Image (spheres, rainbow, N blue to C red):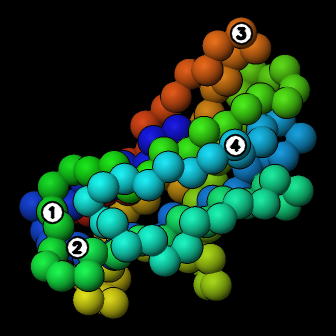
Amino acid sequence: MTLEVDTHGDPVNGAAAHGNFDPSLLQLISITPGVTLPTIVRSSFDNHAGQADYVSRLPAGPASGRFVLAVLTFQAVAVSPGASFSFSTAEPRKTDITYYDQSVLQSLNPDVRVIIAATRDQYDYVYLPLVGR
């Protein structure tokens, strides 16, 4: 599953994606960082709790446009028509996009359906869009 940020041209220099998934259906195998925000502050997951956390920053200068924040690789552990990945929006695991520590996140797709077939992986794009500042 690709976590993608779209700034609509606005500057950003930090992103935090915190999500929850059903560990009886999915197990997170890895988190692969994107290249636009190269300083990884946190990259962790807990398959028992069904939680994924990824935070990264750009130390100098802003980024803008559409870019990949990270790629989450899941493995199905049970057959199902799909499993949800929902973003956490409350502290201390608040999903956010920032510019010099100020939130600039305008909208968030709060619940994403992850479809993983029993015989092949299928990845969905997750957009964390900014509508403007």
Q: Nearer the viewer, residue 70 or 78?
A: 70
Q: CA separation, marks 4 and 3?
A: 17 Å
* Left or right: 56 as drawn, with respect to 62: right
Q: Choose the circle earlier in sequence order: 4 or 3.
A: 4
Q: Residue at x 73, y 50 (%)?
A: 21
Say which amino acid is labelled 3. Answer: Thr
Q: CA separation, marks 1 and 2?
A: 6 Å
Rendered image: mark on residue 119: 3
Place of residue 93 in the rendered image (x, y in percent of width and height, measured from the top left): 62, 77
Do labels 2 and 4 touch, CB within 8 Å?
Answer: no
Place of residue 75 in the rendered image (x, y in percent of width and height, measured from the top left): 73, 32
Report the mark closest to the observer, 2 or 4.
Answer: 4
Q: Is residue 112 above or below residue 81?
A: below
Place of residue 61 in the rendered image (x, y in percent of width and height, measured from the top left): 13, 79
Say which amino acid is labelled 2. Answer: Val
Q: Which residue is mark 4?
A: 29
Q: Residue at x 64, y 26 (%)?
A: 115
Q: CA separation, marks 4 and 1?
A: 29 Å
Q: Choose the circle earlier in sequence order: 4 or 1.
A: 4
Q: Residue at x 85, y 30 (%)?
A: 77
Q: Which residue is mark 2?
A: 12
Work out which quarter of the rendered image holds the C terminus and state it. Answer: bottom left
Q: Which residue is mark 1?
A: 64
Count residues near mark 4 (Cα–Cα under 10 Å), then give few for <14, some for 14-19, many for 20+: few
